[in-house]
Image (cartoon, rainbow, N blue to C red):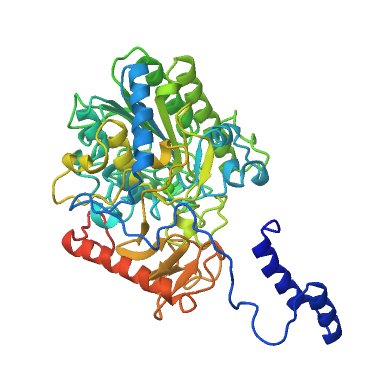
Amino acid sequence: MSLNPVRGGLWGKALVVSLCMTAALCLAAASAHGEEITRGSVTGQTTAKGYDHPNQYMHLRPQQIAPNMEPVMQHLDQEKQARQKLADLEKRIGKKPNILIFIMDDVGWMDPGFSGGGEAVGNPTPNMDRLAQNGLVLTSAYSTPSCSPTRATIHTGQTPLHHGLLRPPMYGEPGGLDGAATFPQALQKLGYVTQGVGKWHMGENQGSLPQNVGYDDYYGFLSVSDMYTEWRDQYFNPEIALSPSRFALMKKMPFNHNNVHCSKSDKKQCRDVYEINLTTITNLDQDWAGYSEKFIRKMAGSDKPFYLYHATRACHFDNYPNSTYAGKSPARTVYSDGMVEADDILGRLVKALEETGQLDNTIIFFTSDNGPECEVPPHGRTPFRGCKGSSWEGGVRVPTFVYWKGMIKPRRSDGIFDLADLFNTAISLAGAPGAQAAQFVPKTHYIDGIDQTSFLLADQGESNRRSRIYTMNQFFSGLRIDEFKTNFIVQLQKAIYQKGYTGGFSGAIVTATGGVTMNNLYTDPQEDVSIGIRHIPMAVIMGAEADRYRQVLKKYPPVTKIGFDGK
Ligand code: CA
């Protein structure tokens, strides 16, 4: 900055005004600077030209590409560059690219090393860091506030308000994807082999089973880690584990208690492989890693491209590391041991891709399904406000990178990426870019995702997304454009309970606004100072964008498949 004569002049003047303590000193300083200061303001006229920055779109309007799709910031040059890269690769390899989504559970933005955690928080993540450093780190990638809503958002390309999984189904509650149009179904139609491994948690009823919503094969559990073990553990739940009657009740609860195998050859059910209990849980991530490795090696000889969804058990509570990983993290907590194990597993999958010659043709997408769960320690970390369960940044800003050897230029970008964009981007990579995604869903299905292929692949790619829609439970809760975020509905972490570990699900949800509650995420990532009144010019544009999405919700009304208050 000091090299800029104009800026240097302004800063010099500001320094003179702020540092001089007496009139004599002021005069001396002003004189030394060759200017006289009489009365007025340092923020008077300027000759500074100012700067526009990439990924800032407040002043622009996106383009509507289909009636049932979110509008897009189009970048024709980067689109052309990305398409050329894809065409060149396809010519060389002879098939469309493979897609690997590696999704972790309840891992916070600051848990992996590539976004400030790693060694600094006692769980080194060398594999994640190496891939991130050689890929594109997305510093503003967004999940929903919790597990199932995010996973359904990825699969349907919709916000929870549109896909209807407003919260996770627990202990056999009905509801799930249930026949929704998903991107794995589209990939099947585009000639892909589709494999899922690990945590499902998008419904256990027949219509929601993986093989009925786009997976050729699925190996994992149908719900979430704690459901299999917390009632068995006499430390966490002695009220159940040490009551024979209650324990018997839990054994009979109508959810599948097993690690299962699902195949498209059997639409009715998944086959039980083994019961998940306090012993088998310790090896689950290793078992799943082995399954994914085997799949990758099997696909090496195939003339078809593959899509692999690897959803880890770690690091959702409760973590039970096996003897190899117990204490392996310098933090020695079961959570951090889970991070270390998951990092090893990611490394194994990449190694399998490398050894079989498939790394060049595989895009690897790493993320987490929500921010840290702060009510059950030890848990993840975030530098932002709030936790899992809320739409404060901490609940929904997730550690994310995309790695593709030779195809993605190593860099970091704060362009906005919503995990709903994976829906469009995967379909685009498979050969149906932009508005073509709409052909894979009913006309009543609103696609909240955006094709981000050119953002990822062009060397200086920018986000194709102008705004980010925040949801929480059944609410449209906030909106981001550029560095500005406005919150309409917020979760107050300590509004109900002052003691203990409070977090997303134990706070109060309140209508926030006294008119203009807005934050600048660059100057105030903790979202604790409202700048709405100071920035009314921006707040008005934000309000118009919120109104646009409210119109979308009128035309494509919210649905509830798993909701609140008994619905
Ligand atoms: Ca989760």
The percent coordinates of residue 172 (x first, y second) are 28, 47
Residue occupying image coordinates x 43% and y 42% = 461
Q: Is 420 situated left or right of 211 in this image?
A: right
Considering only vertical position in the picture, is 364 above or below 544?
A: above
Residue at 47% across, 31% down: 285
Instruction: Identify whether 142 is placed above or below 262.
Output: below
> Percent x, y for residue 206?
19, 38
Q: Which one is nearer the viewer's eye here, 80 or 149?
A: 80
Residue nearer the viewer, 217 or 305: 305
Q: From the image, which quarter does the N terminus lie in?
A: bottom right
Can residue 467 be seen here?
yes
Please give left or right for residue 130 compared with residue 256 in the image. right
Going by the picture, which residue comes out furthest to the top?
Answer: 301
Q: How many marks?
A: 0
Residue situated furthest left in the rendering: 443
Q: In which quarter of the image is the C terminus?
A: bottom left
Q: Nearer the viewer, residue 444 or 544?
A: 544
Q: Where is residue 25 in the image (x, y as percent from the top left)?
A: 85, 81
State whether residue 151 is above or below residue 281.
below
> Could you tell whether 31 is left or right of 434 in the image?
right
Whether residue 249 is visible to the viewer of this picture, yes or no, is no
Kindly give the residue lying farthest to the front in the view shown. 34
Kindly identify the residue that appears in the image at 50 percent across and 33 percent down: 282
